[in-house]
Amino acid sequence: MSKTYYIYIVASRKNGFLYIGSTPNLIERIYKHKKGLIEGYSAKHLTKMLVYFETTSSAESMVARERQLKHWKRDWKIKLIESENPNWLDLTIA
């Protein structure tokens, strides 16, 4: 059975601060974002809304995709989010 890995974007609000991360356990990671348990940038900027995620089947591709997205220009990230979630709904409650 293959494992699923996640690359995700959380935001402080629509067009607000963005945080890109990756994890093998999306539910647990988003819980930590919502409770402010992810230190650093995410806690400082209150990035608690899951606005985008994608899956992959290998840890290597997860890390590569996260790295790729982190180097994208901000407007490319916003277009990616809005291509799947135009209203910036919090996908944990949508």
Image (cartoon, helix red, strand yellow):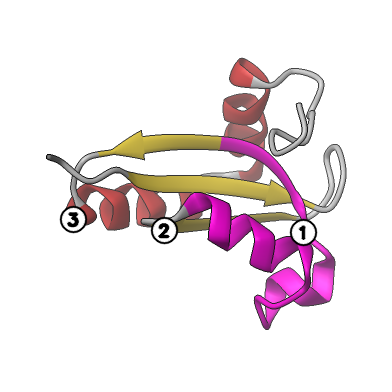
Residue 76, position as x, y percentages in the image: 58, 33
Residue 67, position as x, y percentages in the image: 37, 57
Quarter the N terminus occupies: top left
- Which residue is at a point 57% across and 44% down the rendered structure image? 73
Task: Determine the CA span between mark 1 and mark 2.
Answer: 16 Å
Residue 92, position as x, y percentages in the image: 70, 39
Instruction: Of the two numbered discs 3 and 1 on the same chain, state the one appearing first in sequence.
Output: 1
Q: Which residue is mark 2?
A: 23
28 over 80 or under it: above or below: below
- Which residue is at a point 70% across and 74% down the rendered structure image? 41
- Which residue is at a point 70% across and 78% down the rendered structure image? 37
Q: Secondary structure at mark 1?
A: loop
Instruction: Of the two numbered discs 2 and 3 on the same chain, state the one appearing first in sequence.
Output: 2
Name the outermost residue toward the front.
Answer: 1
61 over 30 or under it: above or below: above
45 is within the stretch colored magenta: yes
Q: Which residue is mark 1?
A: 47
Mark 2 is surrounded, within 10 Å at the Cα level, by few (under 14), some (14 to 19) or many (20 or more) other residues, namely some
Q: Which residue is mark 3?
A: 60
